[in-house]
């Protein structure tokens, strides 16, 4: 069981609870909880952000890193040519 402070019990208002069951579905996670104080059982729902937006942001970051890598690669290639010509 996972203890998670901060989630208020709807019955007594206590902020301590244990997760006794978690189930994921598409864009949300359903968690069954038990209050530390009154032992009341209640359900919370956590919504997962839109994965398409997250994927787009990640793709932009990957493209930016790839451009930086290509730039570094071209600099290294030039330095290697200079070194070969020097020796």
Image: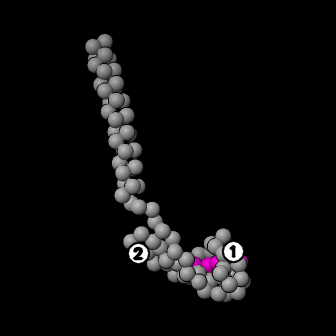
Main SS of the magenta part reads: strand
Q: Are marks 2 and 1 in contact (CB under 8 Å)?
A: no
For residue 71, which quarter of the picture?
top left
For residue 40, which quarter of the picture?
bottom right
Asked whether residue 1 is in view, the answer is no
Q: Is residue 36 above or below residue 71?
A: below
- Can you identify the residue that label 1 sits on? 15
- Can you identify the residue that label 2 sits on? 25
**Could you say whether the residue bearing mark 2 is in a helix, strand or loop?**
strand
The image position of residue 53, as x and y in percent, is: 39, 55
Asked whether residue 54 is in view, the answer is yes
Instruction: Please tell me which of labels 2 and 1 falls first in the chain.
Output: 1
**Could you say whether the residue bearing mark 1 is in a helix, strand or loop?**
loop
The image position of residue 3, as x and y in percent, is: 63, 74
The image position of residue 43, as x and y in percent, is: 55, 81
**Mark-to-mark CA distance, 2 and 1:** 26 Å
Q: Residues within 10 Å of mark 1 (few under 14, many from 20)?
A: some
Q: How many marks?
A: 2
Asked whether 3 falls inside the magenta stretch, the response is no
Q: Residue furthest top?
A: 86
1 left or right, relative to 29: right
Q: Residue at x 65, y 81 (%)?
A: 10
Position of the C terminus, as image quadrant, is top left
Name the residue nearer the viewer: 32 or 70: 32
Q: Is residue 86 above or below residue 59?
A: above
Name the residue nearer the viewer: 6 or 66: 6
Q: Which residues are magenta?
A: 14-19
């Amino acid at each position: 069981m996972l203890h998670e402070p901060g989630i208020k019990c709807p019955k007594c208002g206590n902020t301590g609870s244990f997760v006794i069951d978690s189930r994921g579905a598409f864009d949300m996670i359903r968690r069954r909880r038990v209050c530390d104080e009154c032992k009341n059982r209640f359900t919370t729902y956590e919504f997962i952000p839109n994965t398409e937006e997250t994927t787009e942001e990640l793709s932009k970051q990957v493209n930016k890193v790839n451009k930086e890598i290509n730039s570094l690669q071209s600099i290294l290639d030039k330095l290697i040519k200079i070194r070969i010509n020097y020796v």
